[in-house]
Image (cartoon, rainbow, N blue to C red):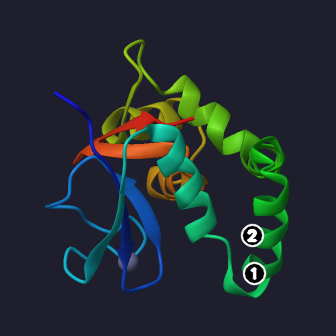
Amino acid sequence: MSMQYNLIKCSCGFSFGSTKSKNNYCTKCGSTSNLKLIERFEDADKLARAISFANIPDEISDELILKIKKKESKNKIAKINNEKNLGGLSVLKKATDKDGNLTKSFLDKYLSDEGLIESSSEYLIGQAEVQGFLIRVDENTWNWLS
Ligand SMILES: [Zn+2]
């Protein structure tokens, strides 16, 4: 079975990745309608990049995308993302099981066990999705793209 990597855009402006073309919902606003399949990718790397670009705020996107595309500097954007998200991502990594699956219910449990009550699992997963680190594989489970 070959995996599909879909870039989905919600009418609220949020873009995310999914392995399904149907039955998705927006992690940001919760909408199940108003979702548009923008593009289908063959591999996870390409999707991860597309998600990062799609979620760069409009005001900085034009200049930034031009610069990045020119240099094809994948490492640079990864570095920016890493610095911004180091805290959240390391929590997500720790809550990922040995098969590479991250479930929301386990993350909730991990956060409360660690006393990280200020971080919500929705927020952490949402942030990682925005930056193309995670892809939803079913309602409660995410896998790592990068
Ligand atoms: Zn939305």
Q: Is residue 102 above or below residue 66?
A: above
Q: Residue at x 72, y 48 (%)?
A: 85
Q: Quadrant of residue 74?
A: top right
Residue count near mark 2 (Cα–Cα under 10 Å), binned few <14, some 14–19, many ≥20: some
Q: Quadrant of ligand 1?
A: bottom left
Indicate the secondary structure of the residue bearing disc 2. Answer: helix
Residue count near mark 1 (Cα–Cα under 10 Å), binned few <14, some 14–19, many ≥20: few
Q: Residue at x 83, y 78 (%)?
A: 63
List the single residue furthest toward the front. Answer: 70
Disc 1 residue lies near ligand 1 with CB under 8 A: no
Q: Quadrant of residue 38?
A: bottom left
Separation of residues labelled 2 and 1 (CA atoms): 5 Å
Q: Viewer-proximal residue, 104 or 63?
A: 63
Q: Is residue 94 above or below residue 52?
A: above
Residue 5: x %, y % from top left: 34, 47
Name the kind of residue labelled 2 in the image: Ile
Q: Residue at x 42, y 12 (%)?
A: 98
Q: Do labels 2 and 1 touch, CB within 8 Å?
A: yes
Note whether residue 57 is visible.
Answer: yes
83 horizontally vs 43: left or right? right
- Badge count: 2
Give the labeled residue for mark 2: 65
Q: Is residue 97 above or below residue 144?
A: above
Residue 112: x %, y % from top left: 49, 38
Q: Is residue 34 above or below residue 40?
A: below
Indicate the secondary structure of the residue bearing disc 1. Answer: helix
Q: Residue at x 59, y 52 (%)?
A: 49
Q: Which mark is residue 62?
A: 1
Name the kind of residue labelled 1 in the image: Asp
Q: Which quarter of the figure is the N terminus placed in?
A: top left
